[in-house]
Amino acid sequence: MNILGIESSSLVASVALITDQMLIAEYTVNFKKTHSQTLLPMLDEIVSMVEFDLETVDAIAVSAGPGSFTGLRIGSATGKGLGLALHKPLVSVPTTDAMAYNLYGYSGLVCPIMDARRNQVYTGIYNNKSGFSVEKESCAMDISDLIRELNETGEKIIFLGDGVPVYKEQIKKEMAVPYSFAPAHLNRQKASSVAALGSLYYEEGKTVSAADHGPDYLRKPQAEREREEQALKGETNGL
C-alpha cells in the first residue's frame, strides 16, 4: 500500500511517501516560503530521488486542518489536483491528530497546540499508550481553559506545536501536573505522520473523493470575523 502525505497547515511544508508502513522518502522545510512554491517541487524531488511512480499511489493523505487558512487551502488544492489527475481518493487527516502521532508510544497524554492568536490555540488531547486514541477532538479554545482541563486529568502531558514558544511561560506558571515539551525533531508537523496515520484511516475506509475533499478550518478566517464584528457594532450603534 502506497500513501502520499501532504502537510501545509502551518509554516512547515512537508511531503512524504509511505509504502506498507515504511517511510520511503520525506521532504520537510520549516521556512517562510509560500507553500504554492514549495509543495510540488518538493514532491517532484522525492519522486525522482526514489524513482517512484505516482500512478501506484493508493491514496493521498492531506493535513486537513485546523491551521493556517492559506496553507490549508494550498494543501487541499494540491491534494485535490493530484487526486483528480491520478484518479485516487483522498484521506483527510486532522492536523492535530497527525501531530500527536509524532509521539506514538509516549506514556502520558499528548497535547498539540497551534497558535490561533488572541490567547487561542488549535488543540486536541491524545493517548498513545496502547495504540492511538483521541481523548479530545480538534478544537479552538482559550489556552487557560486548556491548561485547566489538562490539570484536571491528573496525567503527565507533553506539548508540541508552534503554540509552545508563544505560551511556554504561561504553561510553566499554570501547569499543576508533570509536563514536558517535545524535542526539535518531533515538535512540528510532519508529512510522514500525516501519511502514516492516513494509511490507518484509509484501511478503515475513511476516504473522500478528490472532488469532495475540503479543509476543516474549525472557525472563520480572522478577516471575516472582524467584518462580522464591525457589522454587529454598526447595527448596535444604529439602535
Image (spheres, helix red, strand yellow):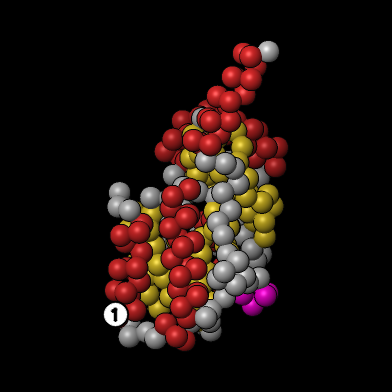
- Residue shown at 35% from the left, 71% from the top: 43
- Residue shown at 52% from the left, 81% from the top: 87
Q: Hey, which quadrant is residue 82 in on the image?
A: bottom left
Secondary structure at badge 1 equals: helix
Instruction: State the predominant SS element of the stretch in magenta.
Output: helix
Pinpoint residue 19: horizontal percent, then vertical percent.
48, 81
Residue nearer the viewer, 115 or 132: 115
Is 231 placed above or below 56 here? above
Q: Would you say 201 lies left or right of 183 here?
A: right
What residue is disc 1 on? Answer: 49
Pinpoint residue 197: horizontal percent, then vertical percent.
56, 68
User: Is 203 colored magenta in this rendering?
Assistant: yes
Q: Is residue 217 visible?
A: yes
Residue nearer the viewer, 107 or 18: 18
User: Is 220 colored magenta in this rendering?
Assistant: no
Is 219 placed above or below 105 here? above
Pinpoint residue 120: horizontal percent, then vertical percent.
55, 35
Q: Hey, which quadrant is residue 192 in on the image?
A: bottom left
Neighbour tally class for label 1: few under 14, some 14-19, many 20 plus, Cα within 10 Å? few
- Residue shown at 37% from the left, 84% from the top: 52
Which amino acid lies under the numbered mark 1 shown in the image of this protein?
Answer: Met
Q: Is residue 21 visible?
A: no
Image quadrant in which the C terminus is located: top right
- Residue shown at 67% from the left, 60% from the top: 133
> From which residue to which does the magenta span run?
201-205
Q: Would you say 135 lies left or right of 53 here?
A: right
Pinpoint residue 124: horizontal percent, then vertical percent.
61, 48
Is 43 placed above or below 111 here? below
